[in-house]
Each structure stands twice: as structure tokens, then as C-alpha cells.
Image (cartoon, helix red, strand yellow):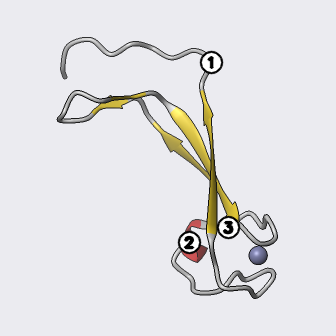
Amino acid sequence: MKRRQEARREPDTTIITAHDEEIVCASCGFDLDESELSASKCSDCGQPLELKKSISIEATSVPIYGDS
Ligand SMILES: [Zn+2]
């Protein structure tokens, strides 16, 4: 699955750039649904589920100034 993370600023002023996270099974690369992330086994290959997360950062990111 792909999960969208919006740019934000953490309370400790760390700035998180907007990015997409893609979460798949580490064993077979099966694209997991959100409901499968907490499963103990991969529904595709049957191995104990380990998540592999890849992150793609947007090319166009908007700096965050000020607060909302
Ligand atoms: Zn798998």
C-alpha cells in the first residue's frame, strides 16, 4: 500500500518533508493492504510478516514557515 505523509513540523521543530510510504511484504514484495499491516503472516506468501517500507520524497516540497 501507499501511504501519504504530508509535510509537517514536529513539536521539537523537526521538519518532515511530504513523502509517500510504500509498505510491502519483505519476503515476497506483496503490496499489503492497510488491514494486513497488523497481520502475523503475509496473506500472499504465508511467511511471518515483516514490513518493508520504502519512502519516496517529493521533488517539490514546500518549506514550512510559521504555524497554523
Ligand atoms: Zn509475502
User: Quarter for ligand 1?
Assistant: bottom right
Q: Earlier in the sequence, mark 2 or mark 3?
A: 3
The label shown at residue 59 is 1
Q: Amino acid at mark 2?
A: Leu
Residue 1 visible in the shown view: no
**Residue drawn at 73 percent across, 85 percent down:** 47
Q: Which residue occupies the foreground of this view, 54 or 34?
A: 54
In the rendering, at what x and y percent does residue 34 appear? 56, 66
The label shown at residue 32 is 3
Looking at the figure, which quarter contains the C terminus? top left
Question: How many C-alpha atoms fall within 10 Å of the one at disc 1: few (<14), some, or many (≥20)?
Answer: few
1 over 17 or under it: above or below: below
21 over 14 or under it: above or below: below
Mark 1: C-beta under 8 Å from nearest atom of ligand 1: no
**Residue drawn at 62 percent across, 18 percent down:** 59
Q: Secondary structure at mark 1?
A: loop
Question: How many C-alpha atoms fall within 10 Å of the one at disc 2: few (<14), some, or many (≥20)?
Answer: some
